[in-house]
Each structure stands twice: as structure tokens, then as C-alpha cells.
Image (cartoon, grey):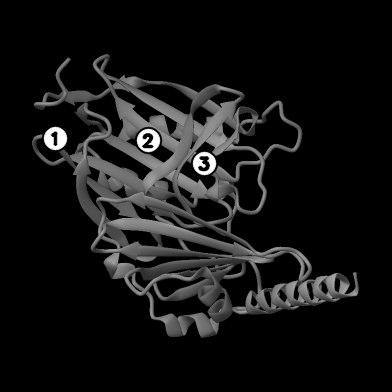
């Protein structure tokens, strides 16, 4: 019995010592990066730090993969949490590769974001492309869809399925691109913008607009097949309708909009269709989930009066 108790005591002390060590490692960006166990084949492209957890976004140019690592620990006596999420991407994120020495300059304030060589906080948030800039750039231009994404907290890739029991209600998420947290309220429209443009045959060019004039491009599969041209005033009207739907009160007491997925497209009716979905509850690590309860997401959709000119392509028939 004494031997067993001695073993149990040693095991308990080792467990507490290890947890205390990992908790201490999470007090710095360098320590958290080591705990994440990121291989050298992946290039660090973004870091997010909030109370008791870190996220690291990486890009593997050979595998064409985006990955987000999550490491967190609430208290020294609790287990460390480590999660990863991976998606294939047609975009080349190599230009965003970060110098690891920037980890040494992480601010003490949280939340904090490292992106494109700069650390940001709520006092110094990133400046996202404005609605007006996007409208001006795509006036009378051919596209397949225009999407905007908002993440109040956490780096966001992939999709999160809404599910209750065995019933699946669809998903929300940016898919194969990286969305960085805004450190601002959604009311300030701090969106990461994505435009899908026909590129011949069964290909599309995907262009993503980030803060500080940073643009990431790539060619990949067609997501929405109908190509169209839209006048600026019609696009503006559609965006205004979408933003109005995003801002309206909801029946859920205290509901927020922690993650937003907004899309504008055009179909054979020649009318502009818009849809918007947003997550109304938040907990640390929610962006890493594959499924959340259906009641955690609200959605709205509609049409904007105004026409778009459908462009017939090889894969827009039917």
C-alpha cells in the first residue's frame, strides 16, 4: 500500500509540475509556439492571442494547406488544450510568411493579433478595406460571387456545421481562406472580402482583400457557377440590405455576432440574391469546432430590386 501511495504521490506531483510548466510556457508567444509543435515545412502567417490561449495560422506551400493551431490552458492545475484545423487552399499565402523573431515583440495586452509583420491590439486595430472601396473596384466587373467575413475573435478557416441530433442545417465559414479577427465591433464593417471571378473553363480566380492593402490571389474550383456583371448602385443597394439585416435586433436575449458570413450572387432571375449567417454565442475555441448546435446560428436572406447581367459560360448553363 505504501508503495502504491508513493507512486500515486510522485505521479500527482509530476502531473502538477508538467501542467505548471505548460501554463508558464503559454505566458509568452515563443513558449506557446513551441507547445503548438509546428513543423518547419509550415510557414507562420498569423498569430492571435487572447486570455489563456493562442492561435497560430500556417501555410504549407508544397501541400497548399492552411492550418490553424490552438493551444490554451485556463489554470495551472488543468490540462492543456491543443487543437488543429486544416483546409486545402487555392490561394498562395507565402507572401504573408512571418519572421519568428516577431514573436518576441508580442504585446502584453489581450486580445492581440500579429499579421503581415505587425502586432495589433484594440487600441491599434487593423484597418480593413471599406465597403466603398470594394464597390468602386467591382463596378461593372464580371464576378461569380462577392463575400465578406467577420471574426470578432479568433483566426477562422474552414466551415462549422450546424447540427441538432442527426439533423444538419448547413454550415457557416470562409472555407479555404483565412479570416483574421477584427478587434472591432461588426458595426464598423471590418470585413475580409473575397471575390470569385471566372477564369475560363471550370476554374475561378479567388481574390481575398485584407487590411493595409494586402491582396492574396489564387486559382481554384468554381464555387458558384453563374457569372454576372453588376452596376455599382445595384451592388451598393444589395450590400446595404445585407448590412441592415445584420444589424437588426434578434429574438435571442444578449445575442451577439461573433462570426459573420455574407454572400452576394446572381441567378437566372437576373436579380441580386444575398444571404447572411452569424454565430450568436461565443466560447474560446469555437472557431476550431466542426459542429455547433443549430440554435447558435442565425441567418437571413433576400433579393434586391435591380438587375444583373448573366454571363453565359461553359459551366453556367442549366
Residue at image location 60% in from the left, 45% down from the top: 258
What is the crowding at mark 3: few (fewer than 14 residues within 10 Å), some, or many (at least 20)?
few
Residue 167 in the image, given as x and y percentages of width and height: 55, 21
Q: Which residue is mark 1?
A: 202
Tell me if I can see residue 25 in this picture.
yes
Tell me which numbered mark, 1 or 2, is placed earlier along the sequence. 1
Tell me which numbered mark, 3 or 1, is placed earlier along the sequence. 1
- Give the CA separation, mark 3 to mark 1: 28 Å
Q: Which residue is mark 3?
A: 290
Answer left or right for 244 relative to 145: right
| Quadrant housing residue 101 | bottom left
Residue 184 in the image, given as x and y percentages of width and height: 58, 56
Residue at image location 28% in from the left, 58% down from the top: 216
Residue at image location 21% in from the left, 39% down from the top: 221
Residue 197 in the image, given as x and y percentages of width and height: 20, 40
Task: Label 3, secondary structure: give it.
Answer: loop
215 or 224: nearer the eye? 224
Q: Which residue is mark 2?
A: 236
Answer left or right for 221 relative to 284: left
| Quadrant housing residue 259 | top right
- Select label 3 or label 2 by which is in front: 3
- Give the CA separation, mark 3 to mark 2: 33 Å
What is the crowding at mark 1: few (fewer than 14 residues within 10 Å), some, or many (at least 20)?
some
Q: Are marks 3 and 1 in contact (CB under 8 Å)?
A: no
Residue 210 vertical placement versus 274 (above, below): below
* Count of marks placed on residues: 3
Answer left or right for 6 relative to 201: right
Amino acid at each position: 500500500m505504501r508503495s502504491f501511495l508513493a507512486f500515486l504521490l510522485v505521479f500527482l506531483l509530476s502531473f502538477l509540475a508538467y501542467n505548471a510548466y505548460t501554463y508558464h510556457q503559454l505566458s509568452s508567444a515563443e513558449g506557446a509556439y513551441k507547445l503548438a509543435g509546428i513543423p518547419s515545412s509550415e510557414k507562420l502567417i498569423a498569430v492571435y492571442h487572447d486570455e489563456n490561449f493562442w492561435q497560430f495560422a500556417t501555410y504549407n506551400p508544397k501541400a497548399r494547406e492552411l492550418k490553424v493551431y490552438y493551444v490554451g490552458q485556463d489554470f495551472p492545475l488543468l490540462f492543456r488544450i491543443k487543437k488543429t484545423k486544416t483546409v486545402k487552399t487555392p490561394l498562395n499565402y507565402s507572401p504573408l510568411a512571418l519572421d519568428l523573431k516577431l514573436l518576441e515583440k508580442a504585446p502584453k495586452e489581450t486580445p492581440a493579433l500579429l499579421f503581415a509583420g505587425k502586432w495589433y491590439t484594440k487600441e491599434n486595430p487593423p484597418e480593413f478595406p471599406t465597403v466603398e472601396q470594394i464597390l468602386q473596384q467591382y463596378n461593372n466587373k464580371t464576378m461569380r460571387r462577392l463575400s465578406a467575413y467577420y471574426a470578432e475573435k479568433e483566426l477562422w478557416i474552414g466551415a462549422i456545421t450546424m447540427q441538432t441530433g442527426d439533423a444538419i442545417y448547413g454550415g457557416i465559414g470562409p472555407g479555404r481562406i483565412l479570416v483574421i479577427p477584427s478587434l472591432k465591433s461588426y458595426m464598423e464593417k471590418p470585413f475580409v472580402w473575397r471575390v470569385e471571378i471566372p477564369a475560363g473553363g471550370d476554374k475561378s480566380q479567388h481574390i481575398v482583400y485584407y487590411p493595409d492593402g494586402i491582396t492574396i490571389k489564387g486559382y481554384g474550383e468554381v464555387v458558384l457557377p453563374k457569372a454576372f456583371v453588376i452596376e455599382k448602385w445595384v451592388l451598393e443597394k444589395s450590400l446595404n440590405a445585407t448590412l441592415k439585416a445584420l444589424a437588426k435586433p434578434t429574438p435571442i436575449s444578449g445575442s451577439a455576432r461573433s462570426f459573420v458570413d455574407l454572400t452576394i450572387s446572381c441567378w437566372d432571375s437576373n436579380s441580386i440574391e444575398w444571404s447572411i449567417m452569424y454565430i450568436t454565442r461565443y466560447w474560446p475555441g469555437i472557431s476550431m469546432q466542426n459542429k455547433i448546435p443549430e440554435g447558435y446560428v442565425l441567418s437571413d436572406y433576400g433579393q434586391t430590386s435591380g438587375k444583373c447581367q448573366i454571363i453565359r459560360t461553359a459551366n453556367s448553363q442549366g
